[in-house]
Image (spheres, rainbow, N blue to C red):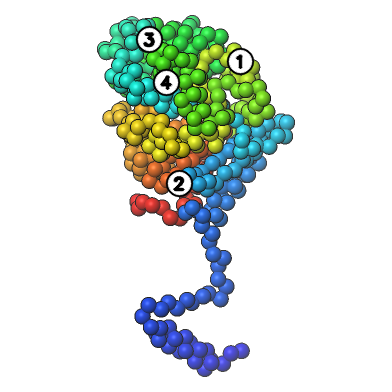
Amino acid sequence: MIPPTAIRRGLCAAIALLFSATPGQAQVVRAPNPARPITVRHGFAVDRLARIDTMLAEAVRREEIGGLVALVLRDDAVVYERAAGWRDREQRVPMTTDAIFRIASQTKALTSAAVLMLMEEGRLALGTPASRFMPTFARTTVAQRTDTGVGIVPARRPITIKDLLTHTAGISYGTDAIVADRYRAKGLGPAAGFGWYTADKTVPVCVSMDTLGTLPFVAHPGERFVYGYNTDVLGCIVERASGRPLDEFIRTRITGPLGMNDTHFFLPTRDRARLVTVYRSDSGRTARAEDGARGQGHYVDGPRVSFAGGAGLVSTARDYARFLQMIAHRGEWAGRRFLSPHTVGLMTSHQIGGLYGPGLGFGLGFETVEQYGASNLASQGTFGWGGAYGSNYKVDPAEGLVIVVMMNQLPNSSDVVARLQTMVYAAMVDSRIQH
């Protein structure tokens, strides 16, 4: 046992040493068992990022998800990249980071960019009526409930390119009860998978969209935000304004120059093995989805003639991140200009006033975060969207972040993607903004 007098002497000596330090000197006092230093890379605590691995492993074990790929970039450097679970659980094929996913509505951002490229070339303007390229849109109608049933009335004004880009044209996916029967009879709405699916069509997308123009919509242009076939109409407008099929335009003007070699409307046969199996997740656990439009789809063996600008592409996490990096760099990537900074500003800033949700907005192709806290931990100014199969992405310019999470579950009741995105922000230890 150490005598009390010795303890007092040691304490006094330590205090004297502390106060004898000359100005500018630092005395380091270490705990008896110093904690292991925190490793920080690109502003992220490595041990906190590791929590995501644990969460994903547990979600796979509980069969909450079949599998996913997550990719996080900061200032274009890879911060986190993981493949979790299975590409095909029944065949025991593990997920890989080069897996190819059906990205559904993530297609919309690329089609929106294509339209805006044509705008920059003077081939159309935001106020151009859709009917200039789509004759059946010259006299659109709106279905409204009346005391005696459903009435069909003329739209109050023409639908414009900007209406389509912002989903304020009044066009739904035709599954609304008020119009569902009419859409079903024309092969759209309930007859098209969940409404948005056209990969099994044996006619070009413009044939379907010309038919759409003859059907009643569910709101007047500019009246409210209605999510639907808007970007599929834009895909047809790209074809008619450019004189090229949509797949060719996107390949030669966007995906090819960006090096997005795994992004296609229909999967090359050589890449069949990399396509992820679709799982259903409507009861807390996943099960393999059926074949056909409401499950595995027709992206390998389908007719390959309907290039849906609203929901048709397949891609990888790395490929899609490259497109987002171009947008984050204000329209430029690898020394090539795709869009002007002003155009990207329109894409990524709120454009529709009070027609969208609280704290959120919608630009010319992206949802925007207008208030911190409206989308979990995402900063104000963040933009992004997702796809029906469960994939999602966010770009946070204030923090230099690009977050891409790819999965294929339809329907999807899991909140793993939201939890993962929150955990990414929780791992960031040198935030560039103060809240």
In this rendering, the label closer to the viewer, 4 or 3? 3
Earlier sequence position, callout 2 versus callout 1: 2
For label 1, the SS is: loop
Residue at (38, 46) in percent of width and height:
398
For residue 40, above or below residue 68: below
Instruction: Find disc 2 in the rendering and name its residue.
Output: 75
Kindly identify the amino acid type of the residue bearing the numbered disc 4.
Thr
Residue 221 or residue 160, whichever sits in front = 160
In three-dimensional space, the C-alpha distance between marks 2 and 1, rounded to whole angstroms, equals 39 Å
Sooner in the amino-acid sequence: mark 1 or mark 4? 4
- Whole-percent x, y for residue 229 in the image: 43, 18
Residues at discs 3 and 1 in contact (Cβ within 8 Å): no
Q: Which residue is mark 4?
A: 231
Q: Which residue is mark 1?
A: 302
State the residue in front, 420 or 342: 342
Q: Which residue in the rendered view is the most extreme toward the front?
A: 335
Is 119 placed above or below 204 here?
A: below
